[in-house]
Image (cartoon, helix red, strand yellow):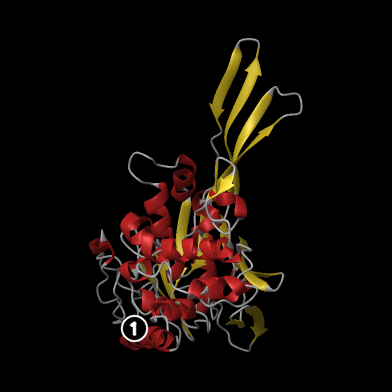
Amino acid sequence: MDQAWSRPVHLYGVERPRGSKTVPSTPVFLPPDSLQRLLDSLRGSGRQLMGPLVRDGAIVFDRIENAAELPRGMRDIQSPGSYRLEQSDSPRLFAWANGPQALKPMTFAPEEVLWQVVRDDSGLHFEPQASTPAPTAVIGVRGCDLAALQLQKAHFLQEGAEDPAFQRRLDKLLIVAVDCSHPADTCFCASTGDGPDAGPGHDIALTELDEGFLLRAGSPQGQEIIDSLALPPASTAQLQAAAESSRGASDAQTRKLPATDLRDALFARQDHPHWAAVAERCLACGNCTAVCPSCFCSAYEPRPSLDGAESEQVRLWDSCFSFEHSNLHGHPVRDDIRLRYRQWLTHKLAGWHDQYGRSGCTGCGRCISWCPVGIDLTEEVASLLEEPA
């Protein structure tokens, strides 16, 4: 499976270790005052448009109607246990790294009814509850989140065990990615091979420059939209500026994972004393798994009506940090935080190689920023790789 993630040199000349062998389309240039034309085209065929907005002190995806709503000049300042926004004089709309959301809520719903059972005089009747997602175009998706979507697809669309709710949402989603030009201090996507530029999985990708945007297609649907705009090809100078932006965003990242394949190293350190040191700080709150773009743990909850005539089976997001998540026959398999943190980290960075052919971490850094006590995954891995004294 690892070969499926080998990445060639990117369009703008930045080499990364994983990705798609698909040859990207020739970039075209979109002036800033024409961005609304792109948004109007995305809304074609009855699509609702989702984009980055400032809500409650963070950048989140929400419904938008026009380009004026996008966060012009906004920067995010992130560090372990800290996230805040800062307004600048920059004309750029995407000069930020990420917020607490990713694509995950748009494909894997935080809460949904899977099936319903109704009782009448003839017995019990079970009926699936099919969701009807609206056609949606989302703009502003980053490379780390595209890579996470590929992992979610590997999980939810396994042959013979396809999740119909996930598939329905995915089929209705048109993705406009934006190459990341201003990574946060917590980002390390360059070391995982998943950024800063957008890899496979998008319909259209944008590179934002001071003078406008470069557009490239990642799907026939995306190419059709770009062709409808009748834009000129990007100039050599614009392509060079895009390459410099990508290299600059990669070089700006100071955090990294020491290797893309930590499977054997982490499995060999199940008894390392550092697990206990992390457990003394970890609150087991589950923030890291909630903001992670690839985590998929879930729980199932029956919700019967008061009269007992019917009941719904609901799937909810869950976390391997919760005490109840490892319950088997009323007894938790992992009854302390040390074991739960070890389970999360080794599954994410080691076990996923066996399941999906790569690590489950795409370097977005959200787990670092949104951890209340500032636990840094990259530092914990480095400590675990050290031989105990």
Q: Is residue 149 above or below residue 325?
A: below
- Residue 64 appears in the rendering: no
- Residue pushed farthest right? 306
- Residue 235 appears in the rendering: yes
User: Could you say where residue 176 lies in the image, as x and y percent from the top left?
Assistant: 46, 64
The one nearer the camera, 274 or 129, is 274
Residue 159 located left or right of residue 36 = left
- Quarter of the view holding residue 96: bottom right
The one nearer the camera, 361 or 91, is 361
Q: Residue at x 44, y 42 (%)?
A: 163
Q: Residue at x 58, y 84 (%)?
A: 91
Label 1 crowd (10 A; few <14 / some 14-19 / many >=20): some
- Residue pushed farthest top? 122
User: Could you say where residue 104 lies in the image, as x and y percent from the top left?
Assistant: 52, 57
User: Could you say where residue 276 lies in the image, as x and y percent from the top left?
Assistant: 53, 72
Q: Is residue 8 above or below residue 236?
A: above
Residue that numbered label 1 is attached to = 239
Residue type pointed to by label 1 = Leu
Q: Residue at x 71, y 24 (%)?
A: 308
**Quarter of the N terminus within the rendering:** bottom left
User: Could you say where residue 35 lies in the image, as x and y percent from the top left?
Assistant: 52, 71
- Quarter of the view holding residue 10: bottom left
**Quarter of the C terminus within the rendering:** bottom left
Q: How many marks?
A: 1
The one nearer the camera, 182 or 369, is 369
Q: Is residue 320 above or below residue 331?
A: below
Element carrying mark 1: helix
Q: Is residue 16 above or below residue 100?
A: below
The one nearer the camera, 35 or 120, is 120
